[in-house]
Amino acid sequence: MGVLTAGGDCPGLNAVIRAVVRRSLAGGHDPIGLWRGYAGLAERSYVDLDMRTVSGILHLGGTILSTSSYDPYRHDGGVERVLEAVEQDGFDAIVAIGGEHTMTITRRLYEEHGLPLIGVPKTIDNDVPCTDFTFGFDTAVQVASDAIDRLHTTAQSHDRVMIVEVMGRNTGWIAVFGGMAGGADAIVIPELELTVEEICEAINARHDRGKRFSIVVVAEGAQLAFASGEKRLIRASPETDMYGYPRLGGIGQALGKEIEARTGFETRVTNIGHVQRGGTPTARDRVLATRYGVMAAELAEQREFGRMAALQGTEMTSVPLSEVEGVKHVDLDYLRIAATFFG
Ligand code: F6P
């Protein structure tokens, strides 16, 4: 039974690897790691996995299998090499742990070539459809909420506006949950346009009622929008990543300049960046990752291929990979609740 981790890393990957390995060993199977995602199959680069190699990794961030964005469909002969490896090296099942793009590769390899694949959704962004929560998200939210707590005290001491930029790609999950947990005074997300003028109005209203500082949480994928209708997506660089996604980042700085110029309040910007993705997973993420891993190994054992382990409500279940399409946006009801405390 092969196990691979692909795409960006996130806290809890090692907990899933451990769970897949321990559950498959308990079932009498023979787990093996694929080095750096699907590249491990194409290059037939494998890592021994046994009780010893997965011992002591539950709490560790990153992934002991390393990761990459290698997509066999984007490399000449990539798919053929993957097929050859599965056939010749005798894989009966492979658990692919990755984000939305990895799920697409996994679905195609299953549907087009009948490979014995199971998906496990991972991302701090919580944007994979058909599952309520992905592991890694809770840790990212905890990091964002801790950062906001720290920024609160210094904002208060200096009467400043603090902008906190968080990750999330094209969704506002981390911003809304982190912002609500940290008591943000405004939250700006891609799913709901909030103009610079509206944000400044909320900050001014707060200051008018005697508050001398404000915390604004902004998701990296939110656009800088103005009442005039002008909108700008701010990017960290003009390049795209290997999957063709824009490299986001910088909305915090752009928004901070506008707020300072328009309100006259001294404004500082913090981008917490990859700190959200590194380090030890929260207890909740360890539990969730463990449940995902055990479910994936059980699906593999039952030869329920072409499915993704999923959390629906409090139940761990599975869905066909063919249903896992597009991006899951934040439920705006969470923002409505957070907004009760704005201004
Ligand atoms: O998908 C996870 C994520 O951390 C996003 O929130 C972010 O936009 C992106 O990955 C950053 O990617 P990279 O690590 O390639 O800079």
Image: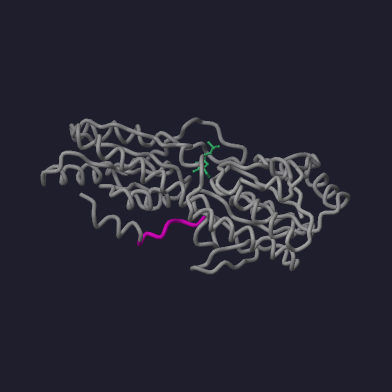
Q: Is residue 250 above or below residue 19?
A: above
Asked if residue 21 is among those painted magenta in the image, a careful observer would answer no
Would residue 144 be found to the left or right of residue 13 on screen? left
- Name the colour scheme: one colour
Secondary structure predominantly adopted by residues drawn in magenta: loop
Would residue 80 be found to the left or right of residue 111 on screen? right
Asked if residue 332 is among those painted magenta in the image, a careful observer would answer yes
Q: Nearer the viewer, residue 216 or 15?
A: 15
Q: Nearer the viewer, residue 33 or 274?
A: 33
Would residue 202 be found to the left or right of residue 174 on screen? left
Residue 321 placement (x, y as % from top left): 65, 61
Q: Nearer the viewer, residue 58 or 204?
A: 58
Residue 227 placement (x, y as % from top left): 27, 44
Q: Residue at x 19, y 44 (%)?
A: 201
Residue 333 placement (x, y as % from top left): 35, 62
Q: Nearer the viewer, residue 155 or 168?
A: 155
Residue 282 placement (x, y as % from top left): 47, 50
Q: Is residue 185 above or below residue 112?
A: above
Quadrant where the N terminus lies? bottom right
Count of all numbered marks drawn on residues in the image: 0
Q: Is residue 260 above or below residue 194?
A: above
Q: Residue at x 16, y 39 (%)?
A: 212
Q: Residue at x 72, y 67 (%)?
A: 304
Would residue 245 be found to the left or right of residue 235 on screen? right
| Residues in magenta, as a range | 327-333
Spot the residue most to the right.
88
